[in-house]
Image: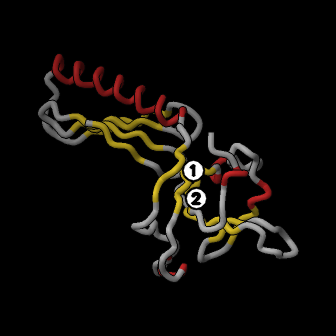
Amino acid sequence: MFTKSDLKTGMLVETQCEGLYFVMLNTGTERTNNVLKTKRGWMDLDQYQEDLTLKSDHDFDIMKVYSVKLECNLFKCFDDNDIIIPTSAELIYERFNEEMESAIKTANIMLDVAREFADKNKLGDGYHEKHFPIGEGMEVVIYSYGGGSLRASVSDNCGFYKYLS
C-alpha cells in the first residue's frame, strides 16, 4: 500500500474530487513544512493521515499519485486555470474506490431490469429519465431514448460521472 511517507517532492496527486496538486516537502515555511500546491493555493500535507486520507474532508482524500519527470520548467505543467497532467507522468498509485465500484454494479443491475421492463412494456419513443439516490451523495440515472434504447449513469457528490450502456 502506498502511504504518505512514500510521497516525494515533485510528485503529482489527484484528490477524490479530481483536484491536482504538486507535492512539496520540507518547504521550511512557518505554517507547515509539507504542502500540496496548485496554481491557486495550497493544502497542508501534514493534515493527511498516513493512508492519504484527509482527517476533516474526504473530498480531498488522495486517490491517485503520479511520478513526474520534470525535464522542463515546473510551470509548464500549469495551463491558464490550473495543473495539467504532463505527458511524462506515470500513475504509480490508485486508491480503490469501493463506493463507486458498488454504485456501478448497482447501476448495471438497474439497467438490466430497466431493459427487461422496456422490452415487456414496449415503451414508445421519447426521452425519459429517472433518478435513484443510492447512498450519501451518489445517484444512478436511467435514461430511455425511446425504441428500447437505454443508458445509465452513476454520479457522486464530486461531479464524477460514469456512463453505462
- The image shows residue 94 at horizontal and vertical percentages of 52, 45
Going by the numbered disc 1, the residue's amino acid type is Gln
| Near-viewer residue (51 or 26) | 26
The correct choice, above or below, for 31 with respect to 133 in the image is below
| Near-viewer residue (14 or 73) | 73
User: Who's the residue at 74% across and 60% down the image?
Assistant: 45
User: Who's the residue at 67% across and 52% down the image?
Assistant: 6
- What residue sits right under mark 2 in the picture? 13
* The C terminus, quarter of image: top left
How dense is the environment of label 2, judged by Cα within 10 Å: few (below 14), some, or many (20 and up)?
many
Q: Is residue 117 left or right of residue 155?
A: left
CA separation in Å, label 1 and label 2:
10 Å
User: Who's the residue at 51% across and 39% down the image?
Assistant: 138
- The image shows residue 23 at horizontal and vertical percentages of 65, 65
How dense is the environment of label 1, judged by Cα within 10 Å: few (below 14), some, or many (20 and up)?
many
- What residue sits right under mark 1 in the picture? 16
| Near-viewer residue (101 or 85) | 85
